[in-house]
Each structure stands twice: as C-alpha cells, then as structure tokens.
Image (tube, rainbow, N blue to C red):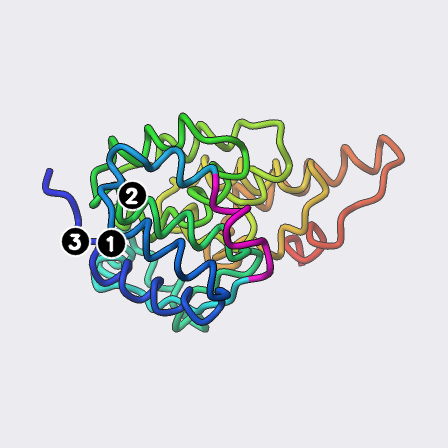
Amino acid sequence: MEAPDQTPALHSLHQAVLPQLDEKGRSWLKECLEENLGGTLDRRMAAARRKVGDRPFSMDFPWTEQTTQIMAERGLSGLLIGHSFWSCAGWDISDAVRILLVLKGSDGQSSVIKESFRRGDEKERCAILKGMLLLDPAGSLVELFIDAGRTNSIEMFSAIAMGNPYPAIFYDEPQFNQLVLKALFLDLNAGHIFGLKQRTGPSLIQMCEDFRQERKAAGRSVPESLKQILS
C-alpha cells in the first residue's frame, strides 16, 4: 500500500509549532528537521521535552479529504456535525514536536511509526497516540491503537480516549463501546470522548445501564458523564 502524503500535515503542524517555541527550541527543531531522522529519531524523541519544554500547545486541525471520505464510507459523516475541525486539547508543546519528528522521520511509513512507538517511553508513546490521526489518516494502525488501549496507565489511556478523534473514526462498535466503559471504570469524564453522542447506540446504552446498576449495588457513586449518556 502506498504511504499517505504527509506533507500537508507536516507543514501545517510545523507552522503552528514555530511561534510557540523560544529561540533555542526553534533552532533545535530546525536542526532535527534538516537531518536524516532515520538514524536519530529515537534520540531526538527522547530529548524533545528537555529541548522545547512542556507548556500547553494549541491548534485546530482541519479534516483532510481522505478522513472525511473514510467517515462517509463508514457511515460516520455525523461526526462532522458541530466539528468543523478537531482540536489538540490536552497536548503540550513537546507532544506536538514529537509528532512533527515522527511525521518527518516516518514519511508515512507505518512500520517506522510502529517502531517509534515500540521503542519510546510512556511520554513518547502518549504523543504518538495523541497525533495518530495526523500520522495515520487511513487507520492502518488501528490494531496498535486498540492494543495500546489495554494499558494500565491512565495517562496513556487518556491520550487515546480523551478528545482524540481516531477511535470514533476507526473503531468498530464493540471496540468503541469498550473504550467508553473503560473510561467510566477509570473515572475519566466520558463526555470528553470525541464523537460519543454520534457513536452511542442501544448496546452502549445497555452496557452503561448495567454499569450504573453495578455501581449502585456496590454503594459507589455514579459518574456524571454516565448520567449524560443515559439521558
């Protein structure tokens, strides 16, 4: 399969990142992007937070033609209602820089993205997960995403579930339902799951009702976001 053209994503993210870096950070990133990252990507990924910091990063990403076409083919065009773009809420600047490095270093090759994820520490993995729609707009790495969702790390699971459009687009119904249930089990705000309203169906409602009954029977509080789903 031909690798997707990463040039538009690389350019738009680069343009958003530069004004949010100080002079030293911009100089370091320029050096990274001008070299052959094939042999240095791991080292550059590890150094990113130290070089650019961890202050909040903000950007609104337009939907690509490829992604909107995939949504239409999967009957998910409703995800676009009220979402003319998707936001990187919860990212910091090192997340954005790491995604930029993987975009440049992988050139759309899924094998490079998988290897970078495998070799990265938790922070690096979280960055890759947050930016997966940029790195893998066709959903070819959905199995990696699902496997990562089995983590016991709340930080990593939040990178997958909270505000990330990738699951809403590429998960099937059972996979998406399990994502919601795990978020509730971890006491995360399920209301922050992208596309929750559009992806909620009878089976998820029944699973959430069962979850509510279990919580009540155990004398535990019912999450507010669960009440929102059931209402």
Q: Residues within 10 Å of mark 3 (few under 14, many from 20)?
A: few
Q: State the residue lying farthest toward the right.
A: 219
Q: Which range is magenta?
A: 47-56
Question: Mark 3 — residue?
Answer: 5
Which mark is in front, 3 or 2? 3
Say whether marks 2 and 1 touch (CB < 8 Å).
yes
Amino acid type, label 3: Asp
Quarter of the image that includes the C terminus: bottom right
Secondary structure category for the residue under label 2 = loop
Q: Which residue is mark 1?
A: 70
Residue 55 vertical position relative to residue 108 in the rendered view, above or below: below
**Is residue 55 highlighted in magenta?**
yes
Which amino acid, mark 1? Ile
- Tag 1 secondary structure: helix
Question: Sequence order check: which comes first, mark 1 or mark 3?
Answer: 3
Q: Which residue is mark 2?
A: 139
Q: Main secondary structure of the magenta part?
A: helix
The quadrant where residue 105 appears: top left
Residue at the extreme left of the image, as rendered: 2
Instruction: Work out whether 127 lies above or below 198.
Output: above
The residue sitting at 52% across, 41% down in the picture is: 203
